[in-house]
Image (spheres, coloured by chain):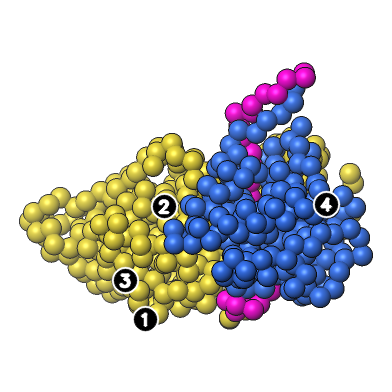
Amino acid sequence: MMGEELFLQGNRAVVEGALYAGCNFYAGYPICPSTEILEIMSTRMPETGGTLIQMEDELSSIAAVIGASWGGAKSMTATSGPGFSLMQENIGYAVITETPCVIVDVQRGGPSTGQPTLPAHGDIMQARWGTHGSHSIIALAPSNIKECYELTVEAFNLSEQFRTPVIILSDGELAHMRERIEITDMPIVNREQFPEGKVSFPVDPNEEGVSPFPTFGRGHRTHVTGLSHTIVGYPSEDTEVQGKLIDRIIGKIENNKDTICKYEIINPDAKHLLVAYGIPARSAKDVVLNREDFGLFRPLTVWPFPSKAFIRATEDVKSVLVVEMNEGQLFREVERHACRAGVENVGLCSKLDGEMPTPQDILESHADMEVDQ
Amino acid sequence: MDTIEIRLSGFGGQGLIMASVVLARAASLYESKHVVQKDDQYKREESGLYVVQTQTFGSGVRGSATKAEVKISTKEITFPEVTIPDILVLMSEASFLKFGENVKPTSLVIVDPDTVKSRPGGEFCEIPATVTASELGNKIAANMVMLGAVVAMTDVVEMDSLKSAMKDMLPPATHELNSKAVDKGFELGNECGGRLQVDWG
């Protein structure tokens, strides 16, 4: 398939990216607008020697994905808002058990059943804080079909490297949109395996804070628990153990932001900075390509937010306008960083009706800010 | 012209989303080298055309309103949706009421006279796609009749490109019917007065 030009739908590009990354287990439950991922996987998995299970719901889907990962598989599920809500408890289980897996959230209008076929970005904060307890998470937001493919490969790579669930934040528009992409070579990362055979615990974490993965069935005892646990994996009520564990699993993401975070900057010297991710970023790019006074900061990594790069990008800007298909979820993150950087004018172009913001909507929101041009 | 915007609208089950995918695929993969005129000479651009296909549909698989859009451009396409179409195909009364008047004076408007009751105020063409497809054996091929007509009236893609994309996307057992539907649509399009010359100059 290398070098081949394909005309793909967003959901299919996610599937092909996953397979390229080595995904060999998929469990899911159909829900619009993510259904094509399950559908296409159901034909592609048998072709590539992998396993697919259509589960009875989203709770069991994410549970199967976590179990498969402990069996050594590269595993994935896809859903939309309502199903993503149901997965939250076990996403926390994947975080504390440090289980590599990929969850695709093809966002639609909500809350609840909402608009099953229309796009929204209402799950940005749910991706960050949907599961309980202190933790960090990685979430990536593609803006085009090429990125649906490439960020899925990247999601698997990051989940393997950092032993953590990684979330892809797609949406109903991108999921059903088609564009041409060229498949190019990308590096593949596989988790560091616990040494095979009977070995003594513990094996210390590497400098990134990640321990080798003790896959079931490789000759050593493995214990997996959602309880606070020691490096060996057994439960502990020791407060120091809990403190160290949470510090490390947050730190392995927050201390490695330079490796993890990806972003795009266009017109870095412009007076006004637009911040957008996902499908609305295309409208923002349209503005920036037609107006020299506007620049764009586009986080491909929404979580952890690329704060250092963003603060650098705000140097000498007069205003920052965040474009989102929600009521301003990343806006608060952007606003607090902009304030730290000394930018006073921070505005929001918010679209909540299931239509994506147009370039005109963005310019009108900026005009409403009444910033000196 | 550097960008052409196409909107197909009707109700779920007419195959307009599939039609948009076939047209977009034809432009994206089979028209990869477009011809431009430079210094009195025709030259092939190696970069190919940029194409984005989008769609909107309701929760009901059949009967609910659908909108399928294709943007074809010699430049990178940022905003993926169609604002005012250059080519508008209407196959239901509801689609006429929603999109019928949102056109430019130069837009080519095509209606299926048997599925759309109203008629646009400005110029338009009638292509009886549903009836034609029924006569060919199955009204499900009405979408391909429409595509044949669009190609005849606009040259937006080559007929060969359209047929190649159609064969990629549709089940082999339907190729004969759909091929006939495209050819018949092409004939009907040529008989129709309206034209919109697509020229990637």
Q: List the residue tagged with mark 2.
A: A16
Identify which amino acid the numbered label 1 is placed on.
Glu
Tell which subunit mark 3 falls on.
A
Identified at 73% across, 66% down, the residue is B128
Q: Are marks 1 and 3 in contact (CB under 8 Å)?
A: no
Q: List the residue tagged with mark 3.
A: A53
Q: Secondary structure at mark 2?
A: helix
Identify which amino acid the numbered label 3 is placed on.
Ile
Placement of the N terminus of chain B among the 4 image quadrants: top right
Distance (Cα) linking label 2 and label 1: 25 Å
Q: Specify start and end residues of the magenta stretch as a single range.
A: B39-65
Q: Position of residue A260 (x, y in %)?
A: 46, 47
Q: Is residue A219 visible?
A: yes
Tell which subunit mark 2 falls on.
A
Distance (Cα) linking label 1 and label 4: 54 Å
Categorize mark 2 by other alpha carbons within 10 Å: few (<14), some (14-19), many (20+).
many
- Does the magenta segment cover residue B64? yes
Which chain appears yellow? A
Distance (Cα) linking label 4 and label 2: 42 Å
Q: Quadrant of residue A76?
A: bottom left
Placement of the C terminus of chain B among the 4 image quadrants: top right
Tell which subunit mark 1 falls on.
A
Q: Position of residue B134 (x, y in %)?
A: 62, 70
Q: Secondary structure at mark 3?
A: strand
Q: Position of residue A5 (x, y in %)?
A: 49, 41
Q: Quadrant of residue A336?
A: bottom right
Nearest to the observer: residue B21 or residue B124: B124
Task: Tell me: residue A295, above or below residue B21.
Answer: above
Task: Tell me: residue A126, above or below residue B198.
Answer: below
Q: List the residue tagged with mark 4.
A: B194
Q: List the residue tagged with mark 1.
A: A56
* Circles 1 and 4 on the same subunit: no
